[in-house]
Amino acid sequence: MATSEYVDDPNQRPPVIGAKEEGGAGPRRRDFLNIAAVSFAGVGAAAVVVPLVNQMNPSADVLALASIEVDLSKIAEGSGIKVAWRKQPVFVRRLTAKEVTDANAVPVSELRDPETLAQRTKPGKENWLITMAVCTHLGCVPLGVTPGENRGDFGGYFCPCHGSQYDTAGRIRKGPAPKNLQVPEYSFKSNTVVQIG
Amino acid sequence: MSFPWAENYEPKNPLMKWVDAKLPLPRLVYNAVGAGYPVPRNLNYFWNFGVLAGLALTIQIVTGIVLAMHYASNADMAFNSVEGIMRDVNAGWLLRYMHMNGASMFFIVVYIHIFRGLYYGSYKAPREMVWLLGVVIFLLMMATAFMGYVLPWGQMSFWGAQVITGFFSAIPIIGDPIHTWLLGGFAPDNAALNRFFSLHYLLPFVIAGVIVLHIWALHIPGSNNPTGVDVKGPQDTVPFHPYYTAKDGFGVGVFLIVFSVLLFFYPNYLGHPDNYIQANPLSTPAHIVPEWYFWPFYAILRAFTVNWFWIPAKLWGVLAMFSSILLLFFLPWLDNSPVRSANYRPAYRIAFWVLVVDVLVLGFIGKMPAEEPYVRIGQFAAAYYFAHFLLIVPIISMVEKTKPLPNSISESVLHGEAEEAAPIGVGSAH
C-alpha cells in the first residue's frame, strides 16, 4: 500500500482519494486544476490592469484635433508670432533674406539632425519658418521669435532652460537638445493665410 | 527586538494587561521606540535626524490634509484656490507656509541624515537593507515633492512639470508615448494636474509605510554609533527611552526654532517669485530652476551638452541624473572597508568632505543659468561625483591604512570621561 510512504515523509502530499493508481508519476488532475485556476485568475487580473493603465492616456477631448488658421499679413520681416495649437505653442516666423542665406550656407553634413531649410519649409515659401515652439530637449518654449529676445549664437532661437541654440532654420546647433524644432503639418490657404493642423 | 538584555514590557495597569493580551500594540511601540530598544550609549546629535525626518513627514501630512480641504485640483482654479488659501481661509497662510517650508525642512534633515550615514558607514553590513530602504524613501520623497510643487499651477509649477516629465521623452522609441501617457496629453494640463494631486496625496502614506520597514530593518542589527564598533554587551547600550527620547526632544526643539524662523520671517526665501504668476503654456520664464533640494541633480542633468558615442546628449543627461541616485543602491558593495566610521579612516574622511563640497558646488551650479563658466564647472563637479562612488571609494577601501579601533563602545566612552574628569596636566598621563 502506497499510503504508508507518505506518512513518513511530511514533504509529500497524501495521494488524492479516488485517484487512479495507473495515473503514475505524471501531473494529477488536481495539479491541472490548480494551474488552470491560478492561470485564469492571472489572466483576469492582467485584463483589469489594461483599463487602469489606459485611463492615463489622453482622453477624447484632449485628442480632439483642432486646426487653426493664422493671418500672416501682419508679420514683419525678421519677426514672428507665437500661436497656440493643440494647447502647444507654435512659432510662425518670417525670415529675412540674410537669415535664409545663412541657413542655406550651413553644410548639412555637419548638423546634428541633418535637414535643409527647403525640407523644413514649403516650396516657394522658404522665408516662412513654421515650427513647434517646444524645445526638443525638455519642452521649454525657446526665446527669439520677436527680434528683441535672445536668439543665441546662430540667430534662430535660444532655449532659456538648458541653453539649447537653434539656427534660422530652427535646427539644433548647440546644447543638449537632440532634434531640430519639429515642423507641424500645415498648408498655405492663400498668400497670407496658413492653416496649421 | 535586538539584544537579549533589552528591557521587557510588563504592563501593570489591568487595562494595559488586557490590551496586551488582545493586541500587543503598546508592546510593539515599547520595543521599537521605548525602553525596550537598547541603543549604543555614545550616539551624538547627528543621530537625531532620523526622528526629525519623521517629525517633518508628520508636519507635511497634517498640513497637507487640511490644505487639501481648500485646494481645487483643476487647471482653471488651482492657482486661485491657492491664493484663496493665502488670503481667505482662516490661518490658511500659516498652513500653506508650513507645508511649503516644511518640505524644505524635510529635505535639509534628510540630507544631513544621509551624509551622517555616509560619514559613519551606516550603510555597511549588517545595515545594507536599512540603507537600501532609505534610498527608496529618498526617491519617493523626490517624486512627492516634485508633484506637490506642480499643484499651485504657477509658472515654475507648469514649466517644472514640462521639464521633468520631458525626461521620459529621452527614452529611445517608446519615450514619446510614455511622456504622453504620463501627462495624459501633449503638454501639462488638467489631466496631469489631477493625477499629480492624486499621487501627491497617496505617496506620503507610502513613505510612512517604507519608514516602518526602514526602522524594522534597523532594529534587527540595532543602531550604528560614532565609533562604528559593534555593541558587545549591556554596558555598551542604554534604553531608547528615556535617554534618547530626551536627547531627541532637545533636537526637536532646535528643529522647531529653525523652522519657525524660516516660516515666520523668510517664508518665501527658498521659493521662486515666478511661481506667484499663473501658469502660461505659451511663455517659458527666462530662467527655470527647480526647488533648492533638486539643484545638485539638475546640475548633473545639464552637464551633458554634446552627443557622446551613439547616445544623444539629452539621454546622457537623464541617465546621469537618475544614476546619480541609483548609484547609492550599490554603495554597500562599492565600499569594502571593514571599518565603518570615518573617524578611523583618514583617507575616506578626506574623500567624504570633498564629496560634501562637490555636492554643494553642484547645488550652486544647478541654481545658476546654463552659461559659462557654470556649465564647465558643473561638468567637472558631476564627473567628480561619479568618480567618488565608482573609483575613489572602492580604491580607498582597498588601500587605506585605518586607525586602531577602540575595543568597545563603553571603553571609548569611559576613556573620554577619564580624560575629562582628570585634573589639568594629569589627564594626558592616562
Image (cartoon, coloured by chain):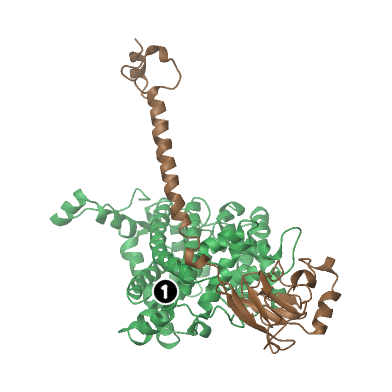
Chain colours: A brown, B green
Report which quarter residue B101 is drawn in. bottom left
- Furthest-front residue in view? A190
Q: Horizontal placement of B256 versus A104: left or right?
A: left
Say which amino acid is labelled 1: Asn
Percent across and percent down for residue B283 are 58, 81
Label 1 sits on a secondary structure element that is loop
Q: Nearer the viewer, residue A92 or B260?
A: A92
Q: In this rendering, does residue B330 appear at all?
A: yes
Q: Horizontal placement of B183 versus B51: left or right?
A: right
Residue at x 65% of width, y 55% of height: B394
Q: Nearer the viewer, residue B178 or B299?
A: B178
Count the numbered circles shown: 1
Residue where numbered disc 1 is placed: B74
Chain where mark 1 sits: B
Residue at x 51% of width, y 74% of height: B425
Percent across and percent down for residue B208 are 38, 61
In the depicted structure, whether residue B54 falls above or below residue A133? above
Q: Horizontal placement of B221 versus B121: left or right?
A: left
Report which quarter residue B324 is drawn in. bottom right
Residue at x 35% of width, y 74% of height: B63
Q: In this rendering, does residue B417 appear at all?
A: no
- Furthest-left residue in view? B14
Percent across and percent down for residue A20 are 36, 14
Report which quarter residue A1 is drawn in. top left
Q: Nearer the viewer, residue B82 or B30?
A: B82
Percent across and percent down for residue B74 are 42, 74
Circle 1 residues within 10 Å: few <14, some 14–19, many ≥20: some
